[in-house]
Amino acid sequence: MLSSGSNAEIYVQITNGGGQFLTVSGTKHCVSVHNEISFPATDASELRIVIEKGKAVVENIEVY
């Protein structure tokens, strides 16, 4: 979830090692409300959130 004051275009990438990140969610315009990005289950070892435009503060990340 992004914190209040955030206004950004973001996307999520994952990798299972080796340094090659794959985009698992397309660019999403997020504002300071609850934003949820989900993608199919995977055994990824790393996740990164790319802020493509604007500014954002990630308040929390929940993994299910």
Image: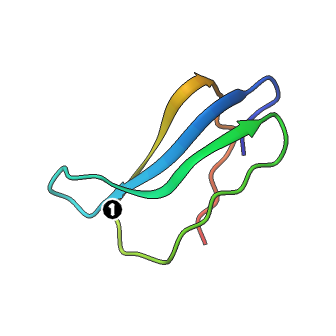
Residue at image position (64%, 36%) is 58
Q: Specify whether 13 is left or right of 59.
A: left
On the rendered image, what quadrant is the C terminus found in?
Answer: bottom right
Residue 19, percent from left and from top: 18, 49
Task: Count numbered badges in the picture.
Answer: 1
Where, by quadrant of the figure, is residue 10 drawn? top right
Q: Examine the rendered structure and indicate whether residue 1 appears above or below residue 24.
A: above
Q: Specify whether 23 is left or right of 54.
A: left
Residue at image position (26%, 64%) is 16
Residue at the farthest bottom position: 41
Residue 40, percent from left and from top: 51, 76
Report the amino acid beneath label 1.
Ser
Residue 41, percent from left and from top: 48, 78
Residue that badge 1 annotates: 45
Residue at image position (48%, 50%) is 12
Q: Secondary structure at mark 1?
A: loop
How is the rendered protein coloured?
rainbow
Where, by quadrant of the figure, is residue 39 drawn? bottom right
Q: Examine the rendered structure and indicate whether residue 16 appears above or below residue 53.
A: below
Residue at image position (67%, 46%) is 60
Q: Specify whether 44 is left or right of 5.
A: left
Residue at the farthest left position: 18
Residue 20, percent from left and from top: 20, 52
Neighbor class of circle 1 (other Cα within 10 Å; few <14, some 14-19, many 20+) is few
Instruction: Name the one closer to the observer, 34 or 64.
Output: 34
